[in-house]
């Protein structure tokens, strides 16, 4: 059983990519700010972040794939926002992104965290991008840092055997 997980793990020495959708920029800019702050608050050096814009949320999968395959990153954070509309378009977009990012994580071993808001209204998105419901960008970065730290620890255990 693995028991070394430490909430609030250090980002010192980690290199993390952030893919940020330009669509709903007011929301995604706040998500990005939360993610960057979490990384630096966890002793990560801002120079160890690689922030790449994506035209929209659907394109996050391709940008995250390029980041992962570019090498040298311990984790990637995907930040975006999908708001429900008059059609079910949002359902297909959100499901495709979730599936694509999960598949990328599983096929490469590089964790890609899901900081994509899937809200019914812009007010709900604002509440989750630094408002009353916190900042999901911060949470996605925390998950990336903790997962990368766990994977490093597990790799170290394998090397010691």
Image (cartoon, rainbow, N blue to C red):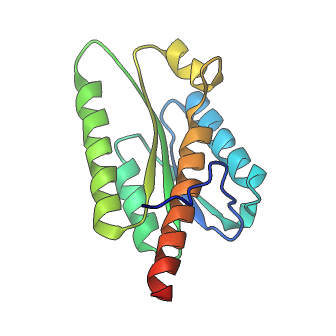
Residue 130 position (above or below residue 113): above
Q: In the image, is 161 to the left or to the right of 108?
A: right
Residue at the image position 36 percent from the left and 48 percent from the top: 59
Q: Nearer the viewer, residue 27 or 72?
A: 72
Q: Where does residue 50 sit, x and y in percent of width and height?
A: 60, 62
- Closer to us: 82 or 154: 154
What residue lies at 75% left-to-right and 54% top-to-bottom?
A: 40
Seen at 54% across and 13% down, the residue is 123
Residue 34 seen by the camera: yes
| Quadrant occupied by the N terminus | bottom left
Relative to 33, is 15 above or below? below
Quarter of the view holding residue 9? bottom right
Q: Residue at x 22, y 20 (%)?
A: 88
Q: Position of residue 42 (x, y in %)?
A: 73, 54
* 42 on left or right of 26: right
- The percent position of residue 103, horizontal first and vertical second, equals 27, 56
The answer to whether 6 is drawn above or below residue 31 in the figure is below
Q: Quadrant of the C terminus?
A: bottom left
């Amino acid at each position: 059983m693995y028991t070394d997980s430490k909430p609030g793990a250090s980002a010192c020495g980690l290199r993390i990519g952030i893919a940020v959708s330009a669509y709903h920029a007011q929301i995604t800019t706040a998500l990005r700010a939360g993610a960057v702050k979490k990384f630096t608050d966890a002793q990560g050096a801002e120079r160890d972040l690689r922030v790449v814009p994506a035209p929209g949320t659907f394109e996050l999968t391709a940008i995250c794939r390029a980041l992962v395959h570019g090498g040298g990153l311990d984790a990637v954070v995907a930040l975006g926002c999908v708001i429900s509309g008059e059609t079910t378009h949002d359902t297909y977009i959100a499901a495709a992104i979730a599936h694509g990012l999960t598949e990328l994580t599983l096929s490469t071993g590089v964790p890609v965290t899901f900081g994509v808001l899937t809200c019914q209204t812009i007010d709900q998105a604002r509440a989750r991008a630094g408002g009353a419901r916190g900042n999901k960008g911060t949470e996605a970065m925390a998950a990336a840092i903790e997962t990368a730290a766990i994977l490093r620890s597990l790799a170290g255990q394998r090397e010691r055997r």
